[in-house]
Amino acid sequence: MDLLLTNRALFAILVSAFAAVAVALTGERNRNLRESWTVLAALAKFGIVASMVPGVLAGQRYDVNLLQISPGIELALRVDPAGILFAMSASFLWILTSFYAFGYMRGGKEKKQTRFFAWLAVCLSATIGICFSANLLTFVLFYEILSVATYPLVIHAGSEKAYRIGRQYLVYAITAGIALVGGIALVHNAAGSLDFVAGGFLEAEMGTGLLWAIFACFFIGFGVKAGVMPIHSWLPNAMIAPTPVSALLHAVAVVKAGVFGFVRLVGYTFGPDLMGVLGAAAVLAAFAGATILLASFIALTKDDLKARLAYSTVGHLSYIVLGVALLAPQAMLGAAFHMVTHAAMKITLFFCAGAIYIHTGKKKVSQLDGIGRQMPLTMAAFGVGAIGLVGIPTIGGFISKWYLAAGTIDAGAYIFLGVLLVSGILNAAYLVPIVTRAFFRTSPDHTRFDEASALMVVPIALTMTLSILLGLFPDAIFNFFSLAEAIVETVTGTTFGGAT
């Protein structure tokens, strides 16, 4: 028992790795047993992660030294507020995605289901490794494992188009990996350490040229997964993957690993002060602001539902990057909380898109007239996710966007306040019409009540409920808001009053 308690961070990573092996060994012989491994691992992972939340909020540290390669270079784990916020979101949503995936894969009679569930488990193992990495080397190791493990899921369809997109994904991933390795080498040479430190550990005395080179390497490395334009195109194309992959990995885990990388870069490597003095924060904010607007405009042009949601993801990931780049405590708080609220709302939308496709075969927005009569529960959940992303009160997105907007004012960055306001209007323009045409138009294709299977509808209802609860009681759900506050407090020293 003592071994488990002191090594919880490691076991949180290993539990899904063990599940991946069990799933692969079970194979197609016993589908129920194979899926049971997935559920048991998801529940165990969430339980282990959740057990550390009270300790983290009380200032307790959970450290695990895995391997010392040489003095100053080691693989190590550490659980802090930033890591456990990301881990709680990913591990909880994996439980719901597991059940949803059972319904999706069975309903669509997908092939290679064993491979799908095994690699999905590996991806979650790598994601938690990213969350709990104590230094840049460990972070990049798990980051690259996640990149490799995602590839079989991207090419799951097995078509020529899927393989072509898979090759594009690998080009982006390998480029990002090379940039990160270069960045690590520069950091270690300059600082003699790779350990994350709240407030940062790099110093201005290292030289402007070297610091900009480090920033450029990490901008490319993290920007690829975060979907920052112009290095974003792999993400919308990767929507060829099954919807559970799009939902969890491209709205919760893979892309969130990129924005989480920026959290580590700004808050725990450079530090807010150095980012501001160097001018790198302004550059990062400019790229994020441009991405928010451009992605929103492109989303308006997409008739394919998953493509529209994909570009919405590109834009909303940069909300988080922008909040971190503004350096103002309230903006950073909004960014941290948006990692959670966006995950809940966007996974709801992707779940809905998948249920519509599996149950009706419809993929286009233009085909959804009257579908609210056939699938009212699904489309009601879609409506909640949509207005949440717009920033309407009572949904989680309002809270995170409120703090982001307040942070732009604190930073005196009124141009970015304008970006947030305009993007909110654009969000409404590309999401709300989907809901109105579903409920206020008619079609002979959708005349009677006929929802998707309960394995899909129940997870949809739960993620919708989570989106609402995060807006009404932001700290009542797994202490997400307190964890977001703790991140900002450790990085900037700012103390907040809390939320109820």
Image: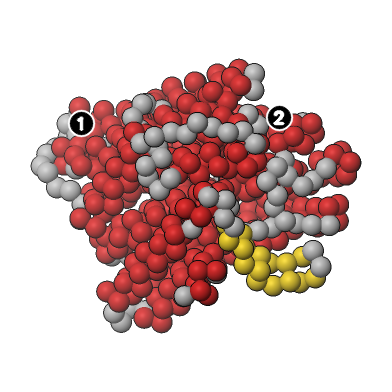
Which residue bears the numbered disc 2?
282
Residue 231 visible? The answer is: no
| Horizontal and vertical percent position of residue 345 | 38, 40
| Horizontal and vertical percent position of residue 410 | 61, 21
| Horizontal and vertical percent position of residue 297 | 49, 28
Amino acid type of the residue tagged 1 in the rendering:
Phe
The nearer-to-camera label among 1 and 2 is 2
State the residue in front, 406 or 236.
406
- First in residue order: circle 1 vs circle 2: 2
Q: How is the image coloured?
A: secondary structure
Is 103 on the left or on the right of 310, as rendered?
A: left
State the residue in front, 485 or 103.
485
- The number of callouts visible is 2
Residue 411 visible? The answer is: yes
Residue that appears at 88% across and 44% down:
206
Task: Assign a secondary structure to mark 2.
Answer: helix
Q: Is residue 493 above or below residue 94?
A: above
Of all residues, the one furthest to the left in this rendering is 448
Residue that appears at 17% across and 31% down:
442
Query: Quarter holding the C terminus?
Result: top left
Which residue bears the numbered disc 1?
439
Residue that appears at 17% across and 48% down:
451
Is 278 on the left or on the right of 255, as rendered?
A: right
- Answer few, some or many: residues within 10 Å of disc 1's Cα (few below 14, many 20 plus, some between 14 and 19): many
Amino acid type of the residue tagged 2 in the rendering:
Ala
Residue that appears at 63% across and 53% down:
172
| Horizontal and vertical percent position of residue 210 | 86, 45
Q: Quadrant of residue 118?
A: bottom left
Find the distance from the CA under tag 1 to the CA under tag 2. 43 Å
